[in-house]
Amino acid sequence: MQLQTIIPLKKVTRNGIDYNSKILLLGSCFSENIGDKLNYYKFQTFQNPFGILFHPKAIEKLITNAINEKEYNVNDIVFQNERWHSFDAHSNLSTSNEKLFLKKLNTTISLTKRKLKEASHIIITLGTSWVYRFIETDMIVANCHKIPQKKFLKELLSVDEITETLEAIISLIKSVNKDVNVLFTVSPVRHLKDGFIENTHSKSHLISAIHNVINQKKNTFYFPSYEIMMDELRDYRFYSEDMIHPNKTAINYIWEKFINTWFTENSKSTMNEIEVIQKGIAHRPFNENSEQHQQFLKNLEVKKEKLKKEFSFISFN
């Protein structure tokens, strides 16, 4: 008896992800979930340099500023609740020191340009079509930083607006890295603060726009994270306590689907070796000084060294 409706996924036959891949992740908090998995398995990744970015306009602005090597100055930042913020970045980057904050923004922008040029795969996770426009400057922001809501206008990006933004993102990326694979996905996290109907409206605009721009011949793809969550995992036992975010089981399930679709067979065997090491590192012995445990640690070091010889960038420190 089949108790699920399974989404058919085609295995990527070229440009798959392996340990030579350099992966840049941008976007919604679900990209953090996938990024954490990639980091655990020691892939070469660079994740959300300006923090979580929920909507496509914010991602477009980051990429534009990185490629144009924007230099942030005091006119580009705001002071709120005793911290300096940028409307282009998540509050995780904010600091109480103005000079240090500007230095952090400019250093990160430069690093982002380098990662855009080096990447073999760029994974972009879109979270919402809803945006906030700062009335004072008439600019759409990435984050409101708890500034009073009366200073913003809330808008829903149309399918055409998002399509235009995604086309700009692809064009910008390809201008500095013509062979890169760009993989879009939609976050399965439901933005219920906007409303149930409004969340569906928002996600539908994102999905429609993505399908307007993807073209495998141009190395632009879609991975159905949202559809897997909504259909294959159609049960509240796959959500965390807030009934909004996917729980660990759901994240692992989607991750396995992603591996089976996008990762090469060679990379899977290396992942298995790394998982053995990671579990060994996490192991807590009853007796740290026992001969058995000391031999266990020696064997673990041998496994680490074997991997480091094959992949010099892998570190377990």
Image (spheres, rainbow, N blue to C red):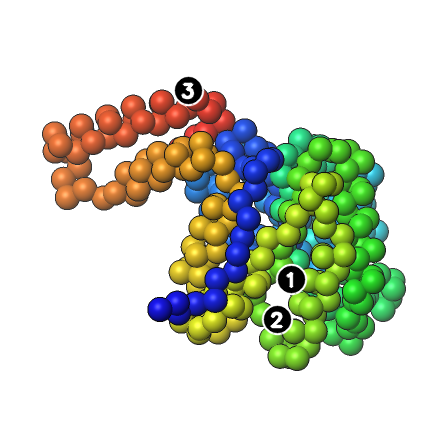
Mark toward the start of the polypeptide (1 vs 3) = 1
Q: Is residue 110 shown above or below 240? A: above
Residue 30: quadrant of the picture: bottom right
Three-letter amino acid code of the residue under disc 2: His
Estimate the x, y position of residue 76 in percent, counting from the top left: 81, 51
- Is the Cβ of the residue at disc 1 closer than 8 Å to that at disc 2? yes
- Tell me the kind of residue under disc 3: Lys
Q: Earlier in the sequence, mark 3 or mark 2?
A: 2
Q: Earlier in the sequence, mark 1 or mark 2?
A: 1
Rendered-image quadrant of the C terminus: top left
SS class, disc 2: loop
- Residue 309 image label: 3
Q: Amino acid at mark 1?
A: Gly
- Residue underneath mark 2: 191
Spatial CA span between label 1 and label 2:
8 Å
- The residue shown at (44%, 32%) is 266
Residue 54 visible in the picture = no
**Is the residue under label 3 in contact with that under label 1 (CB below 8 Å)?**
no
Q: Nearer the viewer, residue 272 or 293?
A: 272
Mark 1 Cα within 10 Å, few/some/many (few <14, many 20+)? many
Q: Quadrant of residue 91?
A: bottom right
The disc at residue 127 is 1
